[in-house]
Each structure stands twice: as C-alpha cells, then as structure tokens.
Image (tube, helix red, strand yellow):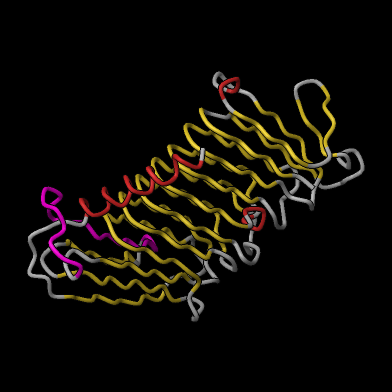
Amino acid sequence: MKRWSGGIVLAVLSLCAFALAGEGEGRKAKDEKSFTVNASEPLTVEIEVTAGEMVLEKGAEPGVATAILEYTEGDFRPKIDFNEKKNQLLVRLGARNWRHMNKGEDRNWARVTVRLPSNADIYLDYRLKAGETTMNLGGLRLKEVELSIWAGQLDVDFETPNLIPMDCLEINTKVGEAQLHNLGNARYKEAFINGGIGELVADFSGSVEPDSKADIDLDIGEATVVLPDTAGVRMEIGGMLSFMSSKQISGSFFKRGRYYYSDDYDEKKLKCTFHITPGLGELRVEGK
C-alpha cells in the first residue's frame, strides 16, 4: 500500500500547482481585519479557499476574530466580511484563473490565517479545493464543525479539550493525506469521517463524551484508526467492500454478535461507539 502514497502525493502537488496558476502581476498583497464578536450569541464562521495554505487557531484575545489573507496580487479574489447582525464571519480567497500552469515560485502564492475567539459558541464551515491546511482547534467553544478538502494535506489537532460538547464533527477528504489528532478532545456527540483516496490517520485519543458515536467511511488507500483508552469501546467493522480490504486489529477485544468490545467495556462507566466502513486498501485499528 505504501507505493500508493507517493503517487497520490505527486498527483496532489500537481493539482495544487495547477490550481495556483494565474496571470497576475506577482506582487504580494496582504489584507488583515479584526472584529469584535458578540460572545453571547453563536458565531458562524464560513471559510472558502480555492488554493493555498490555511492556518486556523485560537486567538489571543477573547471576543476578537481575526482574518489575514496573503496572496499574489491579481491572481486571487479576496474577501473578509463580518455581519454584526448575524454574528457571522465570512472569509474567501478565490483563484481567478485555473487554466495556466504556475510560472515561478514567487507566483500564485496564497496563505490564509484565521484566529477565533475562545468565549463564543462557534459553528465552523471550512472548504478548500487544493492546498495544505493546519488547524489547532483546542481551547475553543466549537458547537459544530464541518471540514471539506478536495485535494491536499489536512492536519487537525484538538491539543486541549473543546470547552463545550460538540453536536457534530464532520470531516470529508477527497484526495490526499489527512492527519487527525486527539479527536476525543473535540468532545463530539456524533462524528462523521470520510476518507477518499489517500492516507488517513484518525486518532480518537482525549476526553471522549459519554455515548458518543463516530462513523468512519473509507474509499481507497491506507487508514489508521486509534481508539481512545478513556472509555469502553464498542466497534463494528462492515460494509459492501469490507471483504476487499486488508484489516489489522491490535488491542484487547472480545466479539459479541457483530460488535467488537474492549475488554473493559462492561466495567467502564464512560462508553463510546465506532462504526468503520473499509474501502479498497488497508485498515489498521489500534486499541489499548
């Protein structure tokens, strides 16, 4: 399976180079705006990036949201807008022209940085067509999170626990590599992880919510799922293509019906459920 990763990464990098192409003047521009949000109302954050690098993290100032767009002038359409009445932050960076190849290392470059307040309940919707995304989402008040990546690399970490229980966590990747760390600290009630073509690591370590459920749907490639050690785990592995996947399960489990249970499941007060649908490729499940 390792032989797939090199080809996939090469294809993703080629797509990113194609996506970043344009006919702009090549001068670097920077737009930076900060807004005071209404922390007593839910904050909606919508981010849409055609191509480039993206960083999202907790801001240093409670009650303040900041967006920074850096890009080559003429090649991108930038937009930063805050609707006070709706308590809504909108960040967009769209490429003007996808038809031309990149003409130099100083051309067609873009970077988006968003810093979010830690004292407002946040509904986050993020979409990226091609590029690299790094998110450290620990220490925020995330109510719902939806991340959609068409092509590229995604690195998400909940280094510290979410400050409130999250209703729903949804992560969709089409082509590329995804590294998801400490998802238990997201404190989700429901999670939906969809891995397309490429490599996926989904680590559910952290402060898992009681009776939380996670669905992991895989298409083509390699996937590693790390189960939490803070809760009793019930796991089901199945689906139409399950027989076409290579599966390795490590850890102490017993099987009852169609479910696998961690050895301490009946003793643990805190319990969680996983449903994994393998695709064509290799699945590794690591328990304690």
Above or below for 114 versus 124: below
Q: Given the current orientation, which residue lies at the most extreme front position?
A: 3
Q: How many marks?
A: 0
The answer to which image quadrant residue 118 occupies is bottom right
| Position in image of residue 56 (x %, y %) | 44, 66
Secondary structure predominantly adopted by residues drawn in magenta: loop
- In depth, the one of 138 and 14 nearer the eye is 14
Q: Is residue 75 magenta?
A: no
Residue under the point 7% across and 60% down: 23
The answer to which image quadrant residue 275 occupies is top right
Q: Is residue 103 magenta?
A: yes
Horizontally, residue 161 falls left or right of residue 124, namely right
| Position in image of residue 73 (x %, y %) | 13, 70
- In depth, the one of 98 and 273 nearer the eye is 98
> In this picture, which residue range is highlighted in magenta?
86-105
| Position in image of residue 286 (x %, y %) | 71, 44
Residue under the point 30% across and 49% down: 129
The answer to which image quadrant residue 235 occupies is top right
| Position in image of residue 74 (x %, y %) | 10, 66
